[in-house]
Amino acid sequence: MKLIERPNYLQKLIDLKGTPDIKVITGVRRSGKSKLLEEYTEWIKKMIQRQISFLLI
């Protein structure tokens, strides 16, 4: 299955990085919530250039 990139949603997450708010990603089943978080974690890994462990629930 082809991954649909969603740069607008990813950019919104990136813009909220560092704010004290809790970020909640909601949506219908199979809408790409987990893939968006995977993209975000990959972006963070690229930005800090080291391995980080994330807990995705």
Image (tube, rainbow, N blue to C red):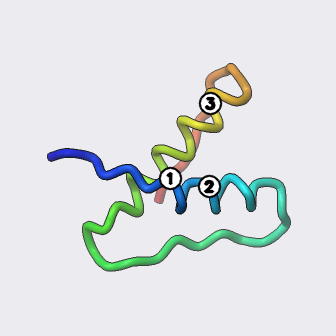
| Left or right placement of residue 10 versus residue 1 in this view | right
Q: Position of residue 14 (x, y in %)?
A: 68, 52
Tag 2–tag 1 contact (CB < 8 Å): yes
State the residue position of label 1: 7
Quarter-wise, where is residue 49 in the image?
A: top right
Task: Identify the secondary structure beneath mark 2.
Answer: helix
Q: In this view, does 9 lie above or below 4?
A: below
Q: Tell me the crowding category of disc 2: few under 14, some 14 to 19, or many 20 or more residues within 10 angstroms, Cα based.
A: few
Question: What residue appears at the point 43 percent right and 56 percent down from the top-left corner?
Answer: 6
Q: Distance between the residues labelled 2 and 1?
A: 6 Å
Specify few, some or many for label 1: CA neighbours under 10 Å numbering under 14, 14-19, or 20 or more: few
Residue positioned most to the front: 8
Residue at 54% x, 60% y is 8
Is 1 placed above or below 30 here? above
Identify the amino acid type marked 3.
Lys
Mark 3 secondary-structure assignment = helix
Q: Where is residue 56 in the image (x, y as percent from the top left)?
A: 49, 53
Q: How crowded is mark 3: few (under 14 residues within 10 Å), some or many (20 or more)?
A: some
**Which numbered marker is on residue 45?**
3
Q: In which quarter of the image is residue 16?
A: bottom right
Report which residue position mark 2 lands on: 11
Alpha carbon distance from label 1 to label 3: 17 Å
Work out whether residue 1 or residue 25 is closer to the camera in this orientation and state it.
1
